[in-house]
Amino acid sequence: MGERKVAEINTLQAELDELIARVCGGIENKKEEKKCLSRIEKLRRTLSKKRSGSRLSRDFKRDLVSYSFIAPNFIGFAVFTLIPIVFAFALAFLKWDGSNAIEFMGLKNFKRLGSDVFFKAAFKNTIIYCIGTVPLTMIASLALAIILNQKVRGRAIFRTLSFFPYVGSLVAVTSVWKMLFHPSKGPINSILYHVFNVPVDKLPQWFSGGLVLLSLILFSVWKYMGYYMVIYLAGLQGISGELYEAGSLDGANTWQKFKYITWPQLRSTTFFVVVMLTINCFKVYDIAIMLAGGGSGELTTSSTVLVYYIYQKAFVDWDLGYSSAVAMVLFAIVLLVTVVQFAYQKKTAD
Amino acid sequence: MAKTKSKSKHDLIKKVVLYVILIIIAALMAIPFIWMLSASIKSDREVFQMDPFVLIPKNPKWSNYVQIWTKIPMLTFVKNTVFLTIIVTLLQLFTSSFAAYAFAKLQFKFRNGLFLAYIATIAMPWQVYMVPQFLMMRSFGLNDKLLAIICLQAFSAFGVFMMKQFYEGIPNELSEAARIDGMTEYQIYSHIMLPLSKPALSTLTIFTFVNTWNDYLGPLIYLKSTSKKTIQLGLKMFISQYSSDYGLIMAGSVLSLIPVIIVFMCLQKYFVEGVASTGLKG
Amino acid sequence: MRKKFLSVLLSAAMVTTLVTGCSGSAGNDTTTSGSTQGATVESTKGTTETTKGNDSKADNVTLKWAIWDKESTAYWQALADGYEATHENVKIDMVDLGSTDYMTVLATELSGSGSEFDVVTIKDVPGYATLVQKNAIRSLDDYIKTDGVDLTKYAGVTDQVTVDGSLYELPFRNDFWVLFYNKDIFDAEGVDYPTNDMTFDEYDALARKLTKTDFGNQVYGAHYHTWRSAVQLFGVLDGKHTILDGDYGFFADYYNMVLNQEKDGVCRKYSDLKTEGLHYSAAFSGGDVAMMNMGSWFIATMITNLANGEYDSSLCGNWGIVKYPHAEGVEPGSTLGTITGLAVTTATDTPDAAWDFVKWVSGEEGAKVMAETGNFPAIMTSEAMDIITSLDGFPQDEASKEALNVSNLYLEVPYAENVSEINSALDSYHGSIMSGEMTVEEGIAAMEEAVKAIKNK
């Protein structure tokens, strides 16, 4: 090893030690800290490369360790989920009924979508449902989490109660909702009738026509609020109390504390919540069937949603290719939303 | 003096408002469940009787709670469901927190690509790949086996995603310091990350528990022998084509709710402890 | 290295899937209609002889049979017991797939080629069409020919499920729609009971005469369940139209009749029924419904539930049935039918034994078992008819007995290639019309457009 190289290694090592000391000593400025950390990582890599002379084996070892972490989950995931999904992807370009020979369709399945009335209705309804549900649920669950993160009496009971709707079996809770919103006998409509003097023939039909999506949205917010509240609670626990103490010393009021401490600190939680919410909203299915389904569980064009249509095409008509094509559209939208979210999170994080 | 008094008055008003809001929310959440309890001791006709509505019928049908064990082999179903739920939850907790650690704290090749594969599958409704999956599982000899449901549920992308987001919230300097101390990645995971992630782990426990417990479509497709069926399938058995036994369904729902509520009650205290109390300053 | 390993792993897994997928299809490729028949003829000839020769000492066979709601339906066990009693070497292994998603689970199970089922029950015609198209069940033509099964006994329904000249199921249960009525309501109003020969106008007038709209004391002259069949299919009873036509103007009169009744409080509102999920049995047994059109399966339900006290006999204990109303100039006794059949899977290793079971259940012996449990067998022998009408609890008036004589039976859904898609489209727009989202004209136009699109696909 040349003298020059040894010297070089020594200077690098010195810089590294100094940086580590600084980081361990604690850096007030978050940005500065991040900078140091990335520099440390970089230095360490250059050093190890210079020392061993072979970057490959070092990296290989590092990768191997990482893969050993991932492997137990990934193998199960790849075999039981990923492969069938790849297959489903391919199906969108094929014609298959689950038994007979597979036929290649090219883009025909996608072309069919354009003239399909049911698909268009399902697409529109799903989008409206998502636009309504995602922000409402997020705001409601965050508010609930903040309230239930404070020292209030009976906190455990309130938390458990808010979690009830999520846990309750869908069959049971939808039937309760349907009684409450019953068009001619339900308490909601009887209040409208008796208190607000709405004439009988003008009473809202909550589960058909123009109102059905609103009912679906309200129900979903109610049912899933507790679920996202739990995620937010876990996130809130991660915020150090010292930050709030510092805030109080600076004379920040409740709103300012929320705006400058809670909200930024919850960034990665919010990202997770919004992504999961969006995905789950696009996948809405059984809620629609149980609240708005007619005599044999069928949905009309005012209440049909994408996954219902996917299910119909796959398991009633056994047109797996076309069903996959519909799913691809859904998948593309969700992916787009997720990528935008990702980019936004990255941008605000830096 | 006057100032503190007005402040305490202000605080009182704030408290009252807070409790009023809480009670309204609690009522919104609880009413349907009170209805459910009430319906579980009613006969079929009383269940949908609204005018007049009675909370406790004159002759409560407690027999619903007895019948649910005798009309269907409920005990077998409970055993199966408990078995499945416990195994799936344990596997899920272990494998996803393990994988999430690598995604959150380690650098390696194809990291982003692999993670994208996970995220992408969350976006795919199960109905789309159910048929190819079923054919594959059957060729592995897993049709009508409890193991099929375990394979299906235990390696979900959701768990990895959730744990990763949580680990990212834990400052890097902790693991950095440990690395400098010469700890291996496995030690960092088990000695530092795992103890810190109690809130996230308990959240994941609850979600996985509820999901597996309430799953219907998976068991429906895979489990056919009566000796292998789950509670949800049992409940659906009542809603058959020509009759619907609402009182019994509600009694069953109440029963199936209890374990999940217990799990939630046990774990919810970890949301209070968690990161802040383990000495970590964010 | 590791990259290679991963890709090897991935591709290995991929190959497994594809092989599974393809072996499913490959297996079936060779058995598409033409060649199946050829193959079956030979194997049938070969094996029927041996089976016949060895009937008593043959190897033990276990037949796996897909059914639903084993606990609440009496006839599954009775049929299996009846067959096992006369066929000692055969064991029937019933697998309960539940009724709510029965056809979905069954079709998934029969996908590919690895299924273990030998005999499957066919619940509805759209599901039957799916299984036929998936090559999941066998053509029974050669068996029928070899064993000389007389299809005329099935009163023409087998013709409505014949696919390109071949039959893939044999019905063992055949329900038809009749009009149930509550005699007490008629007596209280002093109105004559409905008759076995009523036009729709007479029926409508009768329903209106019995209706009382006083709050808290309502009586509904009629009740229509939320199914499409309960309203729309009045239109097919003249025998001139079917739901496969693609031209649905003939629905209009009946939609208008029911919607007008709804408006005048003659029947419960569709949107209320849908929201409540009110079961038709709860509606009729509640004692405030004068007449309800429903399938003959409800007869057994009424008898059982009145006997065990589940239904209040002071509310609905005095009931009767008459034939469906009919349009002007159509023969009375024309009604809708729903068949339940058995089929032999393509995947079975013991097709002959499976066929023998199917033949038995759908034949006279099976019919007797069905009648004894209060159900209508597909072969309506006079013996089976006597068993049902003499059941304890069957209405004792002559008109009710006469009501069981069907003159023309039209299946709710006859077979067609795209029948399941047509069925879904009609179901959906039925909901739109009944809930007021669309007018009758708009709904029918939308049905016609949707079905046209399906046919032109």
Image (spheres, coloured by chain):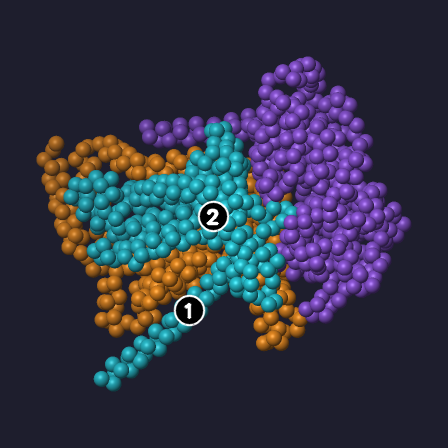
Mark 1 highlights which residue?
B23
In percent of width and height, residue C35 lies at: 68, 21
Residue B137 shown left or right of residue B43 in the figure: left
Q: Residue furthest bottom?
A: B2
Image: A322 above or below A350: above
Q: How many marks?
A: 2
Check disc 2 and give the amino acid type. Asn
Q: Secondary structure at mark 2?
A: helix
Q: Nearer the viewer, residue C106 or C383?
A: C383
Mark 2 highlights which residue?
B214
Q: Secondary structure at mark 1?
A: helix
Image: C342 above or below C425: above
Chain coloured purple here: C
Badge 2: chain ID: B
Residue at point 65% right, 61% down? C272
Residue C271 shown left or right of residue A10 in the figure: right
Residue C139 shown left or right of residue A44 in the figure: right
Q: Nearer the viewer, residue C190 or A316?
A: C190
Residue at point 25% right, 43% down? B190
In percent of width and height, residue B53 lies at: 57, 66
Q: Colour of chain A?
A: orange
Which quadrant, please, contains the N terminus of chain A? top left
Residue at point 79% right, 48% down? C396
Q: Colour of chain B?
A: cyan
In percent of width and height, residue B30 lies at: 46, 63
Q: Nearer the viewer, residue A154 or B114?
A: A154
Image: B160 above or below B40: above
Check disc 1 and give the amino acid type. Ile
Which quadrant, please, contains the C terminus of chain A? bottom left
